[in-house]
Amino acid sequence: MDEIVKWDPFQDMTRFFEEVDKLFAGFLKSFSDELYATQMTGSHMNLQVRDEGKNIVITGDIPNAVKDTVDVVLCQDQVIVSGETTAKENGGQEYHWSRFTRARSLPSKVKSEGATVDLKNGKLTVRVPKE
């Protein structure tokens, strides 16, 4: 006669939860790596806009920006900033590269003639005359 095997209903559940943990651990790791990369490369760049009478001033932090790749486009009442960022980590063993584009509405129409763009130490400043 066959032996009676004691069944543990929690054994299957434990195995199931272990598999779910593995699945989420991999997903969360890839998500946190992406979040870390975007923080390191400035992909969360925030543009601030100030009205200074005759001019609109747009500022933003772009850490690790590659100066020759940063473009600023002015179109009536919008500004679009795009470019590339790079960062080296772990003594140069890891290299992060990112491309970004940010658009922001302006409080009034602007003229591209007479606009100035300055990027120093990861700080972007755009000064644009109003129409």
Image: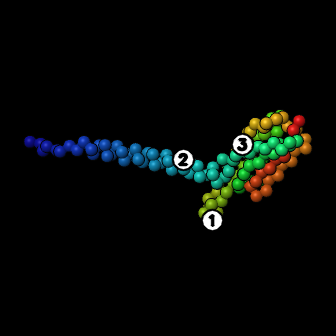
> Pointer 1: residues within 10 angstroms few (<14), some, or many (20+)?
few
> Residue 65's spot in the image, x, y percent?
73, 53
Q: Secondary structure at mark 1?
A: helix
Q: Secondary structure at mark 3?
A: strand
Residue 108 lies in quadrant: top right
Q: Nearer the viewer, mark 2 or mark 1?
A: 2
Q: Which residue is mark 1?
A: 91
Disc 2 vs disc 3: Cβ atoms closer than 8 Å? no
> Pointer 2: residues within 10 angstroms few (<14), some, or many (20+)?
few
Mark 2 → mark 3, Cα distance in angstroms: 21 Å
Q: Nearer the viewer, mark 3 or mark 1?
A: 3
Question: Mark 1 is on which residue type?
Answer: Gly
Determine the residue positioned at 13% across, 43% down: 4
Q: Name the N-terminal-most of marks 2 and 1.
A: 2
Determine the residue positioned at 73% across, 45% down: 47
Q: Which residue is mark 2?
A: 31
38 relative position to 53: left or right: left
Question: Mark 3 is on which residue type?
Answer: Thr
Determine the residue positioned at 49% across, 46% down: 27
Nearest the viewer among 105 and 8 is 105
Q: Name the N-terminal-most of marks 3 and 1.
A: 1
> Pointer 3: residues within 10 angstroms few (<14), some, or many (20+)?
some
> Residue furthest toward the bottom?
91
- Residue 56 visible? The answer is yes
Q: Secondary structure at mark 2?
A: helix
Disc 2 vs disc 1: Cβ atoms closer than 8 Å? no
> Residue furthest toward the right?
114
> Residue 63's spot in the image, x, y percent?
70, 54
> Residue 111's spot in the image, x, y percent?
88, 38
**Residue 101's mark?**
3
Nearest the viewer among 86 and 77 is 77
